[in-house]
Amino acid sequence: MLKSFTSTAFSGLRTVSQQQVRCIQVSARSLNVKDDSAPKAKRTVVSSAPEGTVLKGINYMKDGKDPVALADDAYPEWLWEINDPAVRNARIADPLDKKHHKEARRQAIKGDNFIRDKKT
Amino acid sequence: MSKKAPAAAASLLRLVVPAGKATPSPPIGPALGQRGVKSMDFCKQFNDRTKNVDLGTPLPVIITVKGDRTFTFVTKSPPTSFFLKRAAGIEKGATNIGKDHPFVGKVNLKQIYEIAKIKQADEGMGHLSLKGICSGVVGSARSMGIEVVA
């Protein structure tokens, strides 16, 4: 009897057709090592809150104060990318990225629903 | 496994209570009363525990009521929407969002970062990266009609 798949981690013992098989997830990405030796492009985004601006609305304790903005460089690099649509689109375009497949699946479902929609 | 008497069934209760302003009247009173907890007890303890917080700040609280009607509770950081509305300087989020509707407020990435840092301290967030939490806050902002600028 096939054991049901309960965990998301894809490693350990699985019973596949009466045999115990040890499975290890291999990510597609690890098979296709990217060359990161090229120097990264300098960040072009400049924050609208320069160093020293008081970041209003954050503090909620009686004895605290709103935090003050640090210099742009003091923040981690990924912060400037989370709002960047170009970064997101690049991930969607990359066929090895999970986002690509999620987006493809999402569009397929939308298309499917559109076709099935009964038009009056 | 050793034989033990079965633990008295515990029930969880989730509420959002303004800091320092817990009162026995609805919604707290009936919710606690149903489980046999004296709401005055909870209110006193809650107000005491939140005395360092700005009065009226909404705080999610999880109350665990044991079978013998004793209770413990945990307070978490205020809801993300609360932070975002204050950071953007608005009273309410947008009624409608989307490409045909203008944004109702604006926050910058550094504010998002600070909000995420506060959220990260919550118990349930231990497994999330700060980047992940930031993305979540950006998502909340988007669904409230608040524009996220650099």
Image (tube, coloured by chain):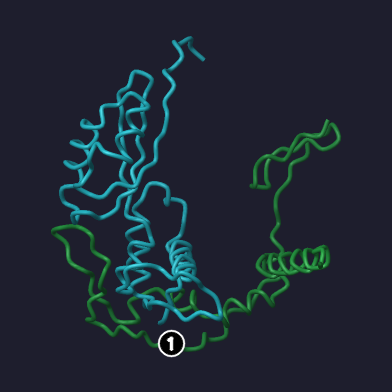
Chain colours: A green, B cyan
Q: Is residue B50 above or below residue A109?
A: above
Can you name the residue that lies furthest to the right here? A17
At which x and y percent is residue B97? 51, 73
Classify A14 as above or below A89. above
Q: Position of residue B111 (x, y in %)?
A: 33, 72
Residue wearing tag 1: A45
The image shows residue B125 at horizontal and vertical percentages of 42, 52
Residue A23, quarter of picture: top right
Q: Nearer the viewer, residue B45 or A23?
A: B45
Q: Secondary structure at mark 1?
A: loop
- Dividing the picture into quadrants, the one containing residue B22 is top left
Q: Is residue A115 left or right of residue B62?
A: right
Nearer-the-camera pick, A39 or A47 = A47
Under mark 1, the amino acid is: Val
The residue lying at 52 percent from left, 85 percent from top is A40
B48 relative position to B69: left or right: left
User: Which chain contains the residue that carries disc 1?
Assistant: A
Which residue is rendered at x = 25% and y = 55% of the image? Answer: B57
| x 82%, y 63%: residue | A118
